[in-house]
């Protein structure tokens, strides 16, 4: 064995632009036309999404029926809970005339 023929292992990374972090960075040039165009496109996209969400929200059918507490109709008087630990069972039947999507 010859000690001079041994390869010395180094912990240094390979001298490449990537490993030595010498890559050129992307530096966009923000011209007024590019900025205004981008804002307009993003704004139009958000207006369309907002209009779709508003339409979906307006089409929600909501129906409420009070069966306990102040303002309960006389038809639901048997459902009144007068004490916090009172176990009352009742059945309420109602009909919805509005058309709903599933």
Image: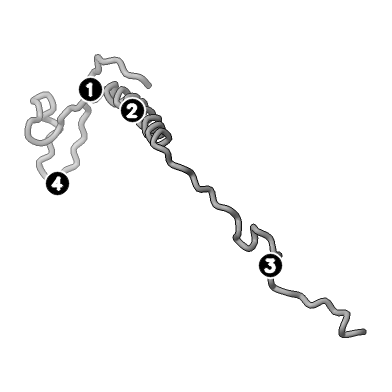
Query: How dense is the environment of label 2, judged by Cα within 10 Å: few (below 14), some, or many (20 and up)?
Result: few
- Callout 1: helix, strand or loop? loop
Q: Disc 2 versus disc 4: distance between alpha carbons?
A: 48 Å
Q: Which residue is under mark 1?
A: 93
Q: Contact (CB < 8 A) between labels 1 and 3?
A: no
Q: Residue 76 carries which label?
A: none
The residue drawn where x is 9% and y is 41% is: 82
Total numbered badges shown on the rendered structure: 4
Q: Which residue is under mark 3?
A: 13
* Quarter placement of the C terminus: top left
Q: Disc 2 versus disc 1: distance between alpha carbons?
A: 41 Å
In primary-sequence order, the first of circles 4 and 1 is 4
Q: Which residue is under mark 2?
A: 47
- Callout 2: helix, strand or loop? helix
Above or below, 77 against 4 in this view is above
Q: Disc 4 versus disc 1: distance between alpha carbons?
A: 24 Å
Q: Position of residue 87 (x, y in %)?
A: 19, 41
Instruction: State which mark lies toward you, 1 or 3.
Output: 3
Instruction: State which mark lies toward you, 3 or 2.
Output: 3
Q: In which quarter of the image is residue 21?
A: bottom right
Q: Colour scheme of this structure image?
A: one colour
Q: Residue furthest right?
A: 1
Relative to 62, is 74 on the left or the right? left
Instruction: State which mark lies toward you, 2 or 1.
Output: 2
Q: Disc 3 versus disc 2: distance between alpha carbons?
A: 51 Å
Q: Where is residue 9 in the image (x, y as percent from the top left)?
A: 76, 75
């Amino acid at each position: 064995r010859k000690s001079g023929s041994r390869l010395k292992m180094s912990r240094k990374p390979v001298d490449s632009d990537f490993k030595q972090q010498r890559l050129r960075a992307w530096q966009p040039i923000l011209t007024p036309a590019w900025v205004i165009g981008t804002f307009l496109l993003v704004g139009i996209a958000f207006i369309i999404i907002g209009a779709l969400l508003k339409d979906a929200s307006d089409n929600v059918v909501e129906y409420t029926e009070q069966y306990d507490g102040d303002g309960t109709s006389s038809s639901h008087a048997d459902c009144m809970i007068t004490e916090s630990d009172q176990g009352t069972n009742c059945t309420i039947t109602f009909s919805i005339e509005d058309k709903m999507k599933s």
